[in-house]
Image (tube, helix red, strand yellow):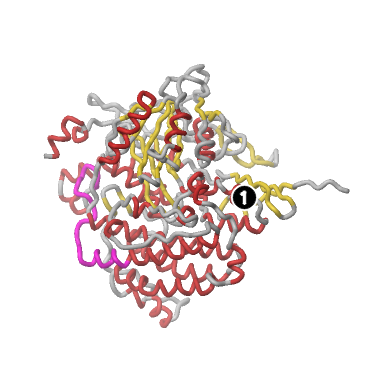
């Protein structure tokens, strides 16, 4: 982390106090968590105040933290079976729940200040609401328009005050939000030409999901914080 | 008197000037555009979701297929984000090779843009001229990676292999005469670096040819001057980057301002536009080709004098060589682990941005410590540009839509992802 970023972090801390909480970063980037009710106020100040001057919003994206930190194959003891490639097709879980885990969905904003040559990342958790709602920043950075539409399309996050919140990447009439972690990779439907109807029709997906490489999480001592200093020297 | 109504016209999705699959719903008043509503996503392949289902190193090939006219630059963004998370240092020679190939890619991209943009608004010859030079650069890709387009050449920790000492040559066939073969193979006797050097020597002359055809061409100027003017403030508001931002007069280039790899050690200039119209963006891109050529020359000089390793020396991330693998038990274990399970990346998040030929190409990776990324987000420059389509074409004639699509340098592989 360079001094310039430390200075920026100190200035943000001084100006916003409890509204922005800093998150530790392993690779020298500055990340702050902002409460969704404070987002609009904080974003306006970050753009308009000369001392911050984040005049560009490079990216907005949704993140679904549903299965964060969980693996598909835990090997704590010896096993004779190994990992089967023929993973059973899991039923599609529709979002019937009234509430989500408060930190399930997040919207991540990447800001850039051309004037100060600094970058900043904001993360806003959408809270327990189903559907998740965040205030739109289109009125602050007009370029956010399509990025928010994309986050809506892929994650079902609603942006309050967005002028034109429509699906953008998926097909016309698509059902579901494909980038949610409970949406299957192979999808739910497939299309083919139906000669009887004389048009392209949707059918339930016929292929089986296959996991070729299981998701595993290994403890690697080289990356643990207390050992990192020791191995470097 | 009859009531006059605006009418709506559908453009695309299969239209030769749409540069792929773009559907535009245009609201017209006579021939003047009132509103444009681009429908994208017809090429959506969920690259990001696919990347989440595969070990880190297996998604490099998907990156080539994003912006399929500047392949290696896409890989660069992705690979840099992984390196940032892993904390790997890339050997200097690999950094120079990456810079050189990034610039080759920039020329590739700009040639494709110039050819297609020219063709769209009436300059047929440009297309043929540009593809003539592109062919040589494709051969560089082939020599170094084995494929002409989807190279998968950049790997976390360096590049796949060192620059080859020989160039592949054209073989004699019944379709090509001996004389023709000799002409084609003239620059291919030496190494790849010799071939690239020969290219850089002739390329400024080629750019002069393009400029002779276009820069002062009356028709070209009529089609581009004062078309789709974007003010610097609007360009920043709309999240423009790359030549689209520089064409509006904002001096911003990640290669200079936030240098990555060895861009701080090479000498080049950033061209900047004045009026922010299609013509200025054309001039910026043409000058960028000349500057890229300059950077490539400097890289060639450095690479000739400094042999060395092109991969980080860390077999937890980089696979051992084939020979080592057959010879050494430990290397065999590493090889097996890397090609089945892959490596686990420490938990955290990283955003790596590079100056892609089209603008800022950023890759945001969230890792939870697994062998697959938890979330990959690709910030494609074209996505921000095309979202401003409506604003740029408003009040222009129908024929100018094509000029605007061209000037934005849209490729749907990256817009739709």
Can residue B310 be found in the magenta stretch?
yes
Q: Is residue A214 visible?
A: no
Helix, strand or loop at mark 1: loop
Residue lying farthest to the front in this orientation: A50
Q: Is residue A65 visible?
A: yes
Tell me what residue is drawn at x 31 percent, y 43 percent: B82
Compared across the picture, whether B221 is left or right of B88 comes to right
Residue A116 placement: quadrant: top left
Give the residue at mark 1: B13
Check the image and report above or below for B206 versus B323. below
Residue lying farthest to the left in this orientation: A233
Magenta span covers which residues? B297-319
* Residue A152 image position (x, y, % from top left): 53, 32
Q: Mark 1 — on which chain does it sit?
A: B
* Residue B359 image position (x, y, % from top left): 44, 52
Q: Nearer the viewer, residue B191 or B390?
A: B390
Magenta stretch, overall SS: loop
């Amino acid at each position: 982390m360079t001094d310039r970023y430390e200075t920026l972090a100190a200035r943000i801390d001084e100006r916003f106090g409890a509204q922005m909480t800093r998150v530790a970063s392993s690779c020298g980037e500055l990340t702050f968590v902002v409460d969704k009710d404070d987002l609009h106020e904080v974003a306006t100040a970050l753009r308009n105040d000369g001392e911050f001057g984040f005049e560009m919003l490079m990216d907005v994206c949704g993140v679904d933290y549903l299965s964060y930190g969980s693996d598909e194959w835990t090997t704590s003891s010896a096993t004779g079976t190994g990992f089967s490639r023929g993973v059973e097709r899991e039923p599609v879980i529709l979002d019937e729940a009234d509430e989500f885990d408060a930190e399930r969905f997040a919207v991540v904003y990447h800001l850039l200040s051309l004037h100060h040559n600094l970058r900043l990342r904001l993360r806003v958790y959408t809270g327990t609401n189903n559907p998740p709602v965040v205030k739109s920043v289109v009125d602050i950075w007009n370029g956010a328009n399509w990025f928010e539409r994309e986050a809506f399309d892929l994650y079902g996050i609603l942006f309050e005050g967005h002028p034109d919140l429509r699906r953008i990447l998926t097909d016309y009439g698509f059902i579901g939000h494909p980038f949610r972690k409970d949406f299957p990779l192979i999808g739910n439907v497939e299309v083919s030409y139906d000669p009887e109807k004389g048009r392209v029709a949707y059918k339930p997906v016929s292929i089986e999901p296959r996991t070729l490489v299981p998701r595993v999480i290994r403890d690697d001592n080289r990356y643990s914080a207390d050992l990192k200093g020791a191995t470097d020297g | 008197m009859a009531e006059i109504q605006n009418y709506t016209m559908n453009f695309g999705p299969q239209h030769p000037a749409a540069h792929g699959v773009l559907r535009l719903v245009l609201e017209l008043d006579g021939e003047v555009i009132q509103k444009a509503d681009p429908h994208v996503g017809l090429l959506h392949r969920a690259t990001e979701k696919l990347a989440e289902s595969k070990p880190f190193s297996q998604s490099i090939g998907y990156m080539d297929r994003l912006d399929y006219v500047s392949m290696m630059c896409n890989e660069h963004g992705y690979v840099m984000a992984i390196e940032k998370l892993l904390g790997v240092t890339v050997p200097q020679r690999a950094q120079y090779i990456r810079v050189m190939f990034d610039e080759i890619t920039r020329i590739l991209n700009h040639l494709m843009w110039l050819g297609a943009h020219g063709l769209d608004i009436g300059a047929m010859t440009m297309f043929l001229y540009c593809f003539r030079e592109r062919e040589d650069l494709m051969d560089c890709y082939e020599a170094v990676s084995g494929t002409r387009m989807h190279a998968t050449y950049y790997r976390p920790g360096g590049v796949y292999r060192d620059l080859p000492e020989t160039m592949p040559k054209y073989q004699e066939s019944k379709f090509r005469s001996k004389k023709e073969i000799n002409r084609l193979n003239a620059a291919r006797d030496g190494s790849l670096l010799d071939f690239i050097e020969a290219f850089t020597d002739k390329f400024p002359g080629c750019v002069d040819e393009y400029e002779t055809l276009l820069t002062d061409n009356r028709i070209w100027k009529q089609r581009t001057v004062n078309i789709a003017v974007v003010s610097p403030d609007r360009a920043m508001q709309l999240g423009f980057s790359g030549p689209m931002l520089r064409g509006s007069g904002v001096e911003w280039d990640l290669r200079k301002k936030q240098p990555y790899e060895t861009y701080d050690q090479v000498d080049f200039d950033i061209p900047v536009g004045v009026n922010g119209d299609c013509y200025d963006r054309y001039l910026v891109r043409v000058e960028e080709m000349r500057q890229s050529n300059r950077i490539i020359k400097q890289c060639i000089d450095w690479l000739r004098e400094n042999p060395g390793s092109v991969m980080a020396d860390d077999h937890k991330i980089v696979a051992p060589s084939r020979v080592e693998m057959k010879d050494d038990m430990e290397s065999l274990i590493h090889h097996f682990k890397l090609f089945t399970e892959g490596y686990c990346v420490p938990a955290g998040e990283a955003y790596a941005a590079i100056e892609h030929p089209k603008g800022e190409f950023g890759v945001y990776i969230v890792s939870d410590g697994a062998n697959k990324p938890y979330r990959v987000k690709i910030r494609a420059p074209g996505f921000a540009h095309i979202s401003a389509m409506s604003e740029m074409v408003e009040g222009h004639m129908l024929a100018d839509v094509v000029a605007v699509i061209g000037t934005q340098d849209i490729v749907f592989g990256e817009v739709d992802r």
